[in-house]
Amino acid sequence: MKKLLLFLIVALSFSCITGCGKLNSAKKNEDSNTSSVNQIKKEDRSMVFVNLSSSRKCKKINDQETIKTVLNFIDNSEKTPIVENEPRAGWVMLINLTTSDGLKQYSVIGNNLTIGDSCYKVSADFLNSLKTLYSQINVQEEDYIIK
């Protein structure tokens, strides 16, 4: 119970720090806040795809075609930029994309997608489609440990 409480506190703190509540950042440098598969060298990518709804499990992905599939799904999904005064807390699905340029983070809760500092409204079935994509990735699930 204490571990769960600690996890929730850390997750909420992280969400508050990097959340959607930055009024001026939603439009700022929009090109850097999209997946932009073509801007990232394939050999420089790795991905940790986390599914909180499955007891904090993740899949660590190095296969470049699988990474491209996930990023294409996000890129091709309809997204409407949103700006809010209050940051959203938490996530159900998290994707950490590591490239030679650093870490890029995608998180989903309900029908809200956060990419970096920008928040988007996505369709009501986006999360379920992302969960289905997660389940179809042929990589062994591991426990997700917050570092």
Image (cartoon, rainbow, N blue to C red):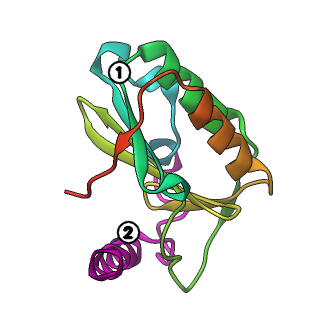
In the image, residue 39 lies at what x, y percent?
43, 25
The extreme bottom residue here reads 85
Question: Amino acid under label 1?
Answer: Asn
Question: Amino acid under label 2?
Answer: Thr
Q: Residues within 10 Å of mark 1 (few under 14, many from 20)?
A: some
Query: Which residue bears the numbered disc 1?
Result: 62
In the image, residue 54 lies at what x, y percent?
52, 52
Asked if marks 1 and 2 touch (Cβ < 8 Å), the reply is: no
Identity of the residue drawn at 50% across and 79% down: 87
Q: Would residue 141 be visible to someone looking at this image? A: yes
In the image, residue 2 lies at what x, y percent?
28, 82
Q: How many marks?
A: 2
Identity of the residue drawn at 35% across and 21% down: 62
Q: Which residues are magenta?
A: 1-30
Q: Could you say whether the residue bearing mark 2 is in a helix, strand or loop?
A: helix
Residue 134, quarter of picture: top right
